[in-house]
Image (cartoon, helix red, strand yellow):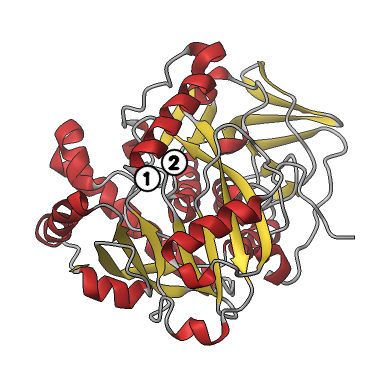
């Protein structure tokens, strides 16, 4: 019987092609450890792997299976930097801090490749990314961004492409121009999840699936995490659930990180059309606030995402909506077969910058990568482990970011977000 995630809709193409996906037991009984990690996605598993490799006694619990959340179901695009462009951050935090954050994001790229190579994880890396301009008035901004990145941030890998070159590179005349980034790419995310879990387990981390945290407390200077069949007592805790809520464990991250649903469809192999559509094999994202993202991958399928839903967590027919968006860019694919359609939740913050905060004594929450989590979430897990073991504290750069809570309080926060994002989605069309 095909496994269906209890927290995310649809069966992903990644699940069908990831190979062996080991199952881990549920927690049964009490445990004591140095660090307890709540959440078995990129951040939590990376933290567990690096902590265990450093000799720290770590227990990790996940409410579903590893990779059932966004980490195993996302668009697979690594991106560059944070979601916010560094020149846009300069006005608030200054050039030096903006440059330091960008450099950390570049370290995150290198770490992903190094970690995969060191531990024999086939992440299915493909090089290149194109950021396409869907409105003519954004052309100047995108052209200047390439110049700023080369001159001020020592990043010469961005090239602005005019409309004709963009059309050839994307295989569509839909866009007005684009940035080509030759120093990043895209991966098979579920394979990275599976591989990171294996590394953590082999290093001695105690990993448990289908084990939700039902309460978070403190006793005698220790952190306690209650689960249905046992209590974990630890010196400190990492909450790494991101968009999948914390079950009422603590209110701070819930006020700062909000979930929005995003959906992806995988087409049947494109056949002869594959020569025309994204001939260079790059991944593509566009300039919408409600971003669309797509790439040709595997056996020349198109993986297309971008229907971010604010009114329905699990729409009845993901495929129909995805196919309509595909047809806007590729009319020749208006009747294409969608073989897999799935969704998941993305954690966003008000400024689209990561949220890292000590929410209680000994308890750190990490999330809100706002669409740039493939490499950053993995790396913040490593940075958390560095901070715990006392090697260095680069995580402080993220703690220092001013990430405000969403307005509206507990009762009105989500309706206000729904209204705001619906408004931005409408503006994307004008």
Q: Residue at x 42, y 44 (%)?
A: 290
How far from the left and from the top, in percent, is residue 121? 59, 71
Say whether disc 1 or disc 2 marks the residue closer to the N-terminus: 2
Q: Could you say which disc has been placed on residue 222 in the image?
A: none
Q: Is residue 269 above or below residue 364?
A: below
Look at the picture and state if 112 lies above or below 411: below
Task: Please give left or right for residue 217 compared with residue 1 in the image.
Answer: left
At 84% from the left and 60% from the top, the residue drawn is 2
Label 2 near label 1: C-beta < 8 Å? Answer: yes
Residue of label 2: 387
- Image position of 328 (left or right of 286): right
Question: How many dots with numbers?
Answer: 2
Q: Secondary structure at mark 1?
A: loop
| Position of residue 6 in the picture relative to residue 391 (left or right) | right
Q: Is residue 56 visible?
A: yes
- Label 1 crowd bin: few (<14), some (14–19), many (20+), radius 10 Å: few
Vertical position of residue 164 compared to residue 30: above or below: below
């Amino acid at each position: 019987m095909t496994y269906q995630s209890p927290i995310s809709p649809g069966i992903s193409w990644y699940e069908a092609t990831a190979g062996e996906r080991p199952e881990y037991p549920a927690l049964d009984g009490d445990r004591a450890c140095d660090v307890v990690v709540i959440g078995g996605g990129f951040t939590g598993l990376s933290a567990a792997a690096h902590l265990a490799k450093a000799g720290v006694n770590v227990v990790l619990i996940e409410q579903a299976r590893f990779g059932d959340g966004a980490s195993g179901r996302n668009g697979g695009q690594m991106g560059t930097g944070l979601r916010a462009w560094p020149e846009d951050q300069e006005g608030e935090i200054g050039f030096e801090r903006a440059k330091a954050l960008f450099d950390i994001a570049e370290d995150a790229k290198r770490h992903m490749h190094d970690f995969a190579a060191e531990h024999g994880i086939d992440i299915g890396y493909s090089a290149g990314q194109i950021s396409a301009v869907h409105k003519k008035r954004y052309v100047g901004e995108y052209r200047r961004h390439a110049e700023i990145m080369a001159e001020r941030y020592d990043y010469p890998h961005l090239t602005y492409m005019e409309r004709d070159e963009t059309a050839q590179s994307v295989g569509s005349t839909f866009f007005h121009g684009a940035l080509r980034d030759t120093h990043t790419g895209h991966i098979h995310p579920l394979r990275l999840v599976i591989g990171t879990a294996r590394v953590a387990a082999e290093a001695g981390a105690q990993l448990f699936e289908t084990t939700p945290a039902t309460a978070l407390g403190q006793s005698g200077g220790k952190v306690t995490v209650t689960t249905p069949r046992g209590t974990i007592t630890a010196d400190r805790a990492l909450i790494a659930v991101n968009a999948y809520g914390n079950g009422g464990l603590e209110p701070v991250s819930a006020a700062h990180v909000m979930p929005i649903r995003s959906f992806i469809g995988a087409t049947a192999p494109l056949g002869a059309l594959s020569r025309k559509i994204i001939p260079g094999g790059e991944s593509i994202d566009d300039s919408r606030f409600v971003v669309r993202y797509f790439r040709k991958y595997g056996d020349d399928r198109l993986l297309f995402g971008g229907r971010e839903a604010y009114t329905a967590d699990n729409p009845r027919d993901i495929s129909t909506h995805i196919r309509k968006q595909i047809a806007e860019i590729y009319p020749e694919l208006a009747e294409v077969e969608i073989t897999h359609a799935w969704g998941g939740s993305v954690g966003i913050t008000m400024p689209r910058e990561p949220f890292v905060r000590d929410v209680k004594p000994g308890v750190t929450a990490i999330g809100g990568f706002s669409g740039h989590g493939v490499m950053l979430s993995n790396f913040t897990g490593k940075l958390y482990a560095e901070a715990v073991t006392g090697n260095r504290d680069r995580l402080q750069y993220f703690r220092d970011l001013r990430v405000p809570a969403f307005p509206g309080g507990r009762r009105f926060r989500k309706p206000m977000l729904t209204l705001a994002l619906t408004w931005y989605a409408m503006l994307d069309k004008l």
